[in-house]
Image (cartoon, rainbow, N blue to C red):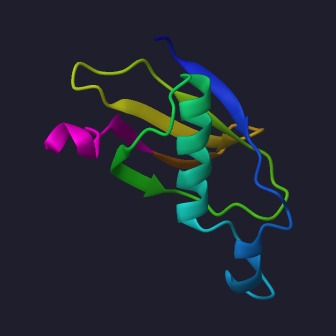
Amino acid sequence: MSPGRCALNIAPDHPAFAGHFPGQPIVPGVVLLDEAACALARALQLERPLWQVGNVKFIRPVGPGEAVFLNWKAPAASGAIAFAIDTTDGQAVASGSFTPAPSPAADR
C-alpha cells in the first residue's frame, strides 16, 4: 500500500456542532478521528475495520464547512499507518496513527 490523500467531508450542519460549542462551533476531535478512520478504510477497501488509535495530537480547531484533507503513509512494520489532517493551505490540524486491531473473533 502506498501513501495517499483524500478530502474529509464534514457537513456544516453536522449534529455535533450544536453542542460543541454553542456560538463558536468546532469539529469535535472524535468526529475528526471517525471521519479519518472511515475515509482510510474506504481508500484501502477494508470492510468495517477495527482500529487502535495511537499518539493523536490535535493542533488547531476546524470550523463548520472548513475543508480538510487526510494524508497517510504506507504502513510501518508494526502495521501502524501514520496520518495527518491539514487544511487546504497546509495548516496542520491533527496527526496520529491507526493500527488495524485484531478482530474480536480472532481472540476466541
Q: Is residue 47 above or below residue 20?
A: above
The residue drawn where x is 39% and y is 44% is 50
The residue drawn where x is 55% and y is 63% is 29
Is 4 on the left or on the right of 16, as rendered? left
Is 72 on the left or on the right of 69, as rendered? left
Q: Quadrant of the C terminus?
A: top left
Residue 6 magenta:
no
Query: How far from the left and from the top, in percent, is residue 44?
Result: 54, 22
Q: Is residue 79 above or below residue 35?
A: above
The residue drawn where x is 82% and y is 57% is 11
Any part of residue 25 in sight: no
Query: How far from the left and from the top, in percent, is residue 88?
Result: 77, 38
The residue drawn where x is 59% and y is 20% is 4
Is 11 on the left or on the right of 92, as rendered? right
Start and end of the magenta stretch?
96-108
Q: Residue furthest left?
A: 108
Residue 97 magenta:
yes
Query: How far from the left and from the top, in percent, is residue 91?
Result: 66, 44
Any part of residue 5 in sight: yes
Front residue of this view, candidates 60 and 50: 50
